[in-house]
Image (cartoon, rainbow, N blue to C red):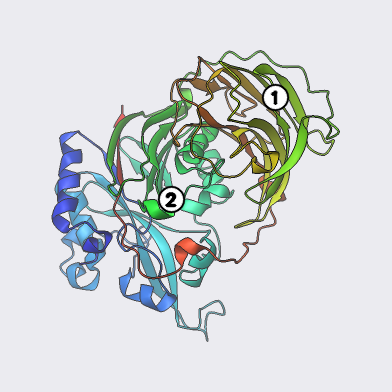
Amino acid sequence: MILAASGLTHKEWLTLITLTCSQNANIIVFPEYGLTGFGYTRQSFRPFLENIPDPEKVSWNACQDPQANSSSPILHRLSCLAKTYNMYLVANMGDLKPCNKSTDEHCPTDGRYQYNTNVVFDDEGKLVARYHKQHPFLNEMKVVDRPLAPEYITFQTPFGKFGTFICFDALFHDPAVPLVTEYKVDHIVFPTAWFDVLPLFAAIGFHGSWARGMEVNFLGANTHVPRLLNTGSGIYSPTGAKKYFRSLSSNGSLSVAALPRDPKNMPHNISVVKAEKIQQRDTGTGDSFYSDLFGDLFFFKELSKPEGTLDVCYNGSDICCSLTYKMTEKRGDEMYAVGVFDGLHTREGQYYLRICALIKCLGSSRDSCGQRTYSASTIFESFTLQGELDTPYVYPQVVADGVSLLPGEWDHNIPPVTHLQSKQQLSKGLLTAALFGRVYELDDGSIIESSAAHFHGHFILVSLLTLIAHLVF
């Protein structure tokens, strides 16, 4: 019953998983809210919750538990699917933990914690991981609770060590970064309900950039609600997307790809000559201007010629970017700019950014630079984007016409990333090329409450988008 709420029947679930088995897949990942849809109140979400045990304290196989089918039907069904089809299974669901205000000062007034939760079952149906989302997004905080401390959840498989987190968690330090730097995972499983916000927050662009910047394999399974721009899933390695899907059609997709077991040892083909430190300090005259990009005031320079080198620094600081480029032609109907930002982003949360970005503007006016645009015709014969961002956490991305990726057509230096550049003439028009820097130690730490239309309104049925990874030994 719960499984069918996503728009897929139990039979369709079995068809998907059977298909993955035929391709020798090791692990299947389902999206955030893929079982339930979203748009709930706290009370209306309650019937979808189950009390999920902590696998670090309890060894439990729901498929082999005679009571589980009645007490925990969702967990029972997922466990049996993993066991029957002999693969690791990652799903997102709701966890319920009763509490008492008299003994727990943090207990919600309704006497229960509700968590947005990832569960992982091994190929025998045993529950091996449970993760509670640390950073609920906007109005989601009215429905689910935030753990008092971040959870660093890993699980070991015969094909590598994995970590997991959820959606908005990817913008913050904890738990995402320590999973790689301290817990030494090589693979991330990432259920998400991410909606595209161009030019810098397209799902396939940002998730692929996280894999590159952190040198891990990244399995991002997104819900598919095209009218809300919830679309874009992928299987990424540190050298690019192995398989990705983004479409505004009503149908989702099942993606299968092979991934290296040891992604940190993958070679980069880029050959970057270390550039001189940028000396120019632009005063805001000539081709320079400020424009808003998703709530942040970027300092831009227009690409007014078909080729050249442009340097731009933020407010006379040492945070600088340099672009060397050549277009096949300078089109009169498209405008490009290279920009820099250094500051605290506060639009839908608070996190400190340092960014170098080459973007296509929406129109021919400078105040359109930073607004969303989805198509581009200008072909770049070559480009190199350099950033002096003074942070080790830089995530490189390139997004092309129609919100697509260009695997194999560009690369970056080994992290910490300071350069990205084309390896050949691009095959499509360029929407974005960016060095997305995060300065985690300057984050405010609080999350701003504001309206989010995609979490308002009635119950939304979500078409399920799934991803499979076949890990290469």
In which quadrant will I find the C terminus?
Answer: top left
Residue for badge 1: 304
Q: Residues within 10 Å of mark 2 (few under 14, many from 20)?
A: many
> Is residue 3 rendered to the left or right of residue 402?
left
Assign a secondary structure to mark 1.
loop
- In the picture, the disc for residue 229 is 2
The image shows residue 223, relative to residue 161, as above or below, that is below
Q: Residue furthest bottom?
A: 102
Q: Residue at x 47, y 29 (%)?
A: 238
* Residue 281 placement (x, y as % from top left): 84, 29
Q: Nearer the viewer, residue 257 or 462?
A: 462
Measured from the top left, where is residue 249 in percent x and y? 31, 46
Instruction: Give amino acid for label 2.
Output: Leu
Which quarter shows the N terminus?
A: bottom left
**x%, y% of residue 120?**
32, 52
Earlier in the chain: of badge 1 and badge 2, it is 2
Q: In the image shown, does 332 or 23 lie closer to the viewer? A: 332
Residue at image point 76% right, 37% down? 289
Mark 1 vs mark 2, CA separation in Å: 32 Å
